């Protein structure tokens, strides 16, 4: 049986010649009938439209006989029994559907030849293995997020110089987060996301690809415990996680452009700040990711180009008044050159005061002070005390000489009599000493208040 099968396959692979077509055409009922009509030149007037001969009847002016072979213009008409072998000959080079039709239109013909060519090409496994992608399916977009951090897209970028970057993008504001890491395991990924979620909260939906760090049971339990819906994109279809994939591509190209302007981490943070502060047409209202995510613009080095309003800074006067009243605080100011004592914190266990001099004032309550060895310290007013310099008296030399010439010997060594003095006599007409006035006391009758006596039977006291 195998021998017969191999023989048949070998015969089918042999090329089809004109002699074979002539012989097989005579055995073909349809082509034999068409052959006679073409030779005689008389075709019947009434042709059954359901019959296959109608295809040749409609093209009878283009049919001819060459070497006993039925021709359609310059193309030989192939009988049914040889059509499969001819199709294999045409498809041997696997040139594709269009080129195969173009080749057939120069050599052979039979009704519905184009349809047969399309069928053999579509059923060819070799052609299907290397064929192009089919026409894209209609887009099925993600639901529109209505608030920040509702749905986030996560992916890894890298390695770039041995470092991976975990990229997290908020679908609402397009706010990106970049975290460099050397490990992309499930444990490392969960640790990074745990810190990030502690800062911004847990999202409702987390979209990732099918990396092993995202498909592990550990990551599944992490999302389940936090009530996060984990959605994975189809395998090898990065478009489904387009938010993260697009930013990964943008990040890689940015790092390539910034290469040579510093280390990779510094370049990534510079790019991140610029990306967050730049207006984004895909964000709500075309605002920057920072405005849509944290509700304000973030300041960058480019803001130095804009003039600022020189308005006096306002202070919380009510809080200052309350603090001053509670602590008995008083306003203390120092001038340049004032001598002060400065708190010295160089010793860990004790704090001492050392002399210093005010050099200049910094802000409302800070001063730059010169201390020993011409060192400069910055201290708060509460860390400064005024230092009074000792007063010196300069005595002239002539005065000192005069004081040396004075005789300091006492005039007498007897002590004066300490007997009580004799009262002077009172002369007539002299004023007499006033007599002491009697002490006045209140004549009001004092009535002490009645003492409280508790009565157990009494319900209340008014």
Image (tube, grey):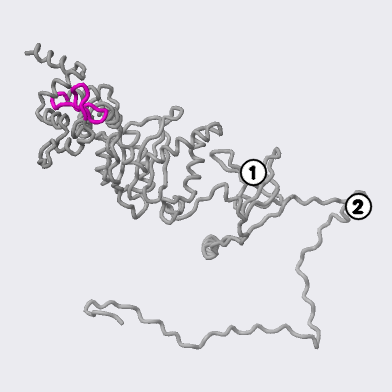
Nearest the eye: 365 or 73: 73
The stretch drawn in magenta includes residue 311? no
> Dividing the picture into quarters, in which one does residue 137 lie?
top left
Is 454 situated above or below 294? below
Dot 2 lies on which element?
helix
* Residue at screen point 79% across, 80% down: 425
In screen coordinates, is 255 left or right of 392? Answer: left
CA neighbours of label 2 inside 10 A, class few (<14), some (14 to 19), many (20+): few
> Dividing the picture into quarters, in which one does residue 96 lie?
top left
- Name the residue beneath numbered marker 1: 377
* Residue at screen point 53% across, 60% down: 327
| Location of residue 324 in the rendering, given as x and y in whole percent from the top left corner | 55, 62
The stretch drawn in magenta includes residue 70? yes
| Location of residue 341 in the rendering, given as x and y in whole percent from the top left corner | 66, 48
| Location of residue 166 in the rendering, given as x and y in whole percent from the top left corner | 39, 37
How many labels sit on residues?
2
- Name the residue beneath numbered marker 2: 399
Give whichever of discs 1 and 2 has the lower sequence position. Answer: 1
Dot 1 lies on which element?
strand
Magenta range: 64-82
In screen coordinates, is 134 left or right of 40? Answer: right
Residue 345: in sight, yes or no? yes
Query: In the image, which disc is placed on residue 250?
Result: none
């Amino acid at each position: 049986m195998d021998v017969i099968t191999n023989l048949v396959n070998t015969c089918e692979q042999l090329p089809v010649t004109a002699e074979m077509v002539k012989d097989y055409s005579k055995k073909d009922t349809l082509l034999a009938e068409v052959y006679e009509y073409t030779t005689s030149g008389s075709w019947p007037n009434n042709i059954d439209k359901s019959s296959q001969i109608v295809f040749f009847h409609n093209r009878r002016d283009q049919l001819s006989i060459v070497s006993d072979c039925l021709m359609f213009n310059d193309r030989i008409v192939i009988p049914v029994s040889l059509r499969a072998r001819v199709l294999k000959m045409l498809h041997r080079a696997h040139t594709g559907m269009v080129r195969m039709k173009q080749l057939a239109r120069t050599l052979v013909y039979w009704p519905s030849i184009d349809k047969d060519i399309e069928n053999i090409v579509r059923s060819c496994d070799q052609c299907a293995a290397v064929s192009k992608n089919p026409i894209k399916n209609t887009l099925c977009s993600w639901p529109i997020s209505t608030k920040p951090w509702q749905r986030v897209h996560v992916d890894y970028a890298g390695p770039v110089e041995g470092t991976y970057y975990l990229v997290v993008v908020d679908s609402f504001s397009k706010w990106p987060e970049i975290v460099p890491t050397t490990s992309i395991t499930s444990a490392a990924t969960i640790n990074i996301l745990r810190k990030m979620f502690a800062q911004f909260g847990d999202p409702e939906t987390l979209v990732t690809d099918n990396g092993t760090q995202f498909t592990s049971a550990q990551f599944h339990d992490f999302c389940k415990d936090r009530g996060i819906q984990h959605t994975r994109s189809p395998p090898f279809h990065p478009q489904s996680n387009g938010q993260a994939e697009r930013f990964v591509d943008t990040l890689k190209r940015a790092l390539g452009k910034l290469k040579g302007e510093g280390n990779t981490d510094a370049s990534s943070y510079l790019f991140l700040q610029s990306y967050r502060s730049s207006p984004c047409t895909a964000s709500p209202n075309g605002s920057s990711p920072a405005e849509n995510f944290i509700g304000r613009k973030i300041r960058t080095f480019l803001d130095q180009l804009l003039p600022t309003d020189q308005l006096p800074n306002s202070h919380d006067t009510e809080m200052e008044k309350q603090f001053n009243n509670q602590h008995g605080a008083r306003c203390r100011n120092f001038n340049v050159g004032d001598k002060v004592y400065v708190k010295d914190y160089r010793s860990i266990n004790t704090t001492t005061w050392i002399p210093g001099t005010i050099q200049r004032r910094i802000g409302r309550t800070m001063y730059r002070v010169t201390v020993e060895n011409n060192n400069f310290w910055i201290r708060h007013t509460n860390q400064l005390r005024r230092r009074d310099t000792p007063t010196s008296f300069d005595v002239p030399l002539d005065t000192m000489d005069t004081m040396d010439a004075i005789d300091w010997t006492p005039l007498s060594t007897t002590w004066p009599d300490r007997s009580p003095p004799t009262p002077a006599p009172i002369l007539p007409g002299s004023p007499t000493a006033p007599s002491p006035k009697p002490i006045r006391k209140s004549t009001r009758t004092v009535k002490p208040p009645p003492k409280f006596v508790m009565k157990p039977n009494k319900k209340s006291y008014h």
